[in-house]
Amino acid sequence: MEAKDQPTGFAAIDFGSTATRACIVVNPKKGDRNGERRVIHVQELRADNVTARSRFEPGEYPSVGCPFDGPPFYVGFDAASQATKRLISLKSIPYFRTNVNDRHPFTEALHSHFKSLPSKAAQLEFEETLDDMLLAFFTSVVNRIIEHSESDFEGFQLQTIALCIPNTWSARENQIQEYLSPILDKTVTGRGIEFIFQFEAQDQVQFMLHRHSGILRTYDYLMVVDFGGHSMGGSHGELRWGDGNRPRFFSPPESDFGVRGGYEIWELQIGQLIEKERNRNRVQIQEKHWHIVKAALLGKFFERKAEEREHARRLTVVLQDVLDPSDLDHDASPNYTINLTGEQVKSAWEDAFRDAIDMAKDNISRIVKTTKDILILLSGGSIKNTRAREELTNFCLKQRLRGTNANIDCKHILQEIGPSLCHLKVSEGGALCLAATMDAEEFFDHGGAFALRMSMKNGKWTGDHAKLLFCKDQGAEISKGVVITISGDKKFTIIADPFYGQQQAGVDKVFIRDCYDIWDICLDYKPTEGAQHPTRIPDGRYTFEVAEMVYAGTDAMLII
């Protein structure tokens, strides 16, 4: 089969703090985005023994590792199967490796162990171990994806893999993407496969647009708020319905938001309380066995995570269920119990959830001022907590009762699409988005255009329009020179209007509300070798234009 006729595959990996999911979407042949697609959910075949107490769904890759009690340093299913080793979420490693002064409970165990090491050499070895653990984990997932692509039955040409990441991992906010990129690239070395990043909340929007557009039919604005294990991320935008069954989705500036918070942070706070209460307990556990008992206590807390935050918790572990009989004192109590007051549980809940809930409220308050029929979809494992879910649904109800112009509905995505697909929505949405992506030249052939948006001297954006920069007219490229003035704090951004040719062809002004951002233009010269600081382009008047557009599949290079 020629390469142009071969099915093409696109994969996405949802790297959760508890578990990791992966999905592949296969187009019938290269460049065919309209044919019937195959959807393959990639599974950890050993992860099928799931009970009501399990933290993992069947087929998921546990996002855990054992960095303290090795070698060997287990990851994934092998780590989750270790009864006597201390576990961490693998998702905490990128935080630790890029935020050395971070005092967040999500990385506390890593920082504590790192500081306890006797030398710089030992600390360096520990950092390398963490990097190797992430590489081993991602390699196991990617290899399973590649196995599908090379199968005689379902083989396809794998083009791109996306890692779905929290909004808090924005490249503008930290260096996590920069840290992860070389690790991910190693998993596909020599295979001609591209690795990219996508935001989890945006992938959930794509899942709804592709798979459940009927649920969205009565709305003209959508916000997805995803409460993961350790962070909340949200994305919102306008739904515009055309002739087809799927709406167009337009995200305004600053429509992606996120902050750390969620159930896993709550559990870490509870773990700190358990440590404090341990000293008051009449039953003493040997230090070498304590992490096993503590993990069992947290497991009991996990079973009741949906309960109200004000409820006291009595956590009891039958010691012979978690420890070897030879490790038990025959005169000691057969059980180990920790009592947490309602106030302790509530305070820990506030520390874990408050920032995330307040940020979600702030963004909801912002969009109700400007739109009419709004759907707020709550998703993620942490939103199963009754108090968190009710606080947001009640907040939306109050917004509706205040008599604003907005008609706002707040729903739990689990009730809309059912539990069987809920944990797969991020990875499937990410893969569907990749499979539906146009080539860059095709974008312009269908009427897409680039425009230049300019700010005033104080950096504030101006007006409702941008200046047309580049488009096509009946196949011929048209480049418009835009006269700009560089001065003060002025900013310039290239934006894209995917439907310019269908709506306002021939007009030099492009409506900003129809566009999305492409590139924030840097006003510095490229530094020469040995230069310590870049040199800013001098203030003055310039003509900004596209001299040439070089197409390379879904990518394009602009020569300005």
Image: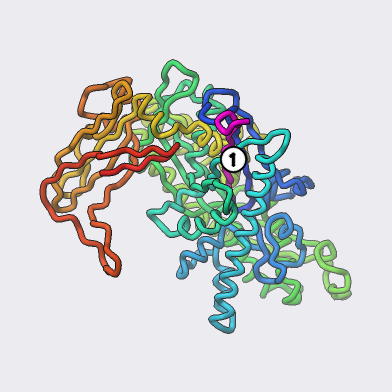
Which image quarter is the N terminus in?
Answer: top right
Using the image as rendered, state which of residue 406 and residue 469 is in the foreground. Answer: 469
Q: Is residue 6 magenta?
A: yes
Q: Is residue 317 left or right of residue 120?
A: right
On the image, which quarter does residue 537 sit in?
A: bottom left
Where is residue 156 drawn, in percent x and y?
Answer: 63, 36
Q: Is residue 198 left or right of residue 292?
A: left
Where is residue 484 drawn, in percent x and y?
Answer: 15, 43
Residue at the spot x=14%, y=40% of the render? 483
Asked whether residue 404 appears in the rendered view, the answer is no
Residue at the spot x=65%, y=45% of the render? 146
On screen, 198 above or below 97?
above
Residue at the spot x=56%, y=62% of the render? 93
On screen, 519 above or below 284?
above
Q: Is residue 166 magenta?
A: no
Asked whether residue 354 appears in the rendered view, the answer is yes
Query: In the current view of this chain or complex, which residue is farthest to the bottom?
Result: 118
Where is residue 35 drawn, in percent x and y?
Answer: 57, 23
Q: Which residue is mark 1?
A: 158
Residue at the spot x=58%, y=48% of the render? 191
Residue at disc 1, secondary structure: strand
Query: In the current view of this chain or complex, which residue is farthest to the left?
Result: 540
- Residue type, mark 1 in image: Leu
Which image quarter is the C terminus in?
Answer: top left
Query: In the current view of this chain or complex, which residue is farthest to the front?
Result: 2
Q: Is residue 287 left or right of residue 178?
A: right
Magenta span: 1-15
Where is residue 223 drawn, in percent x and y?
Answer: 45, 35
Using the image as rendered, state which of residue 419 and residue 46 is in the foreground. Answer: 46
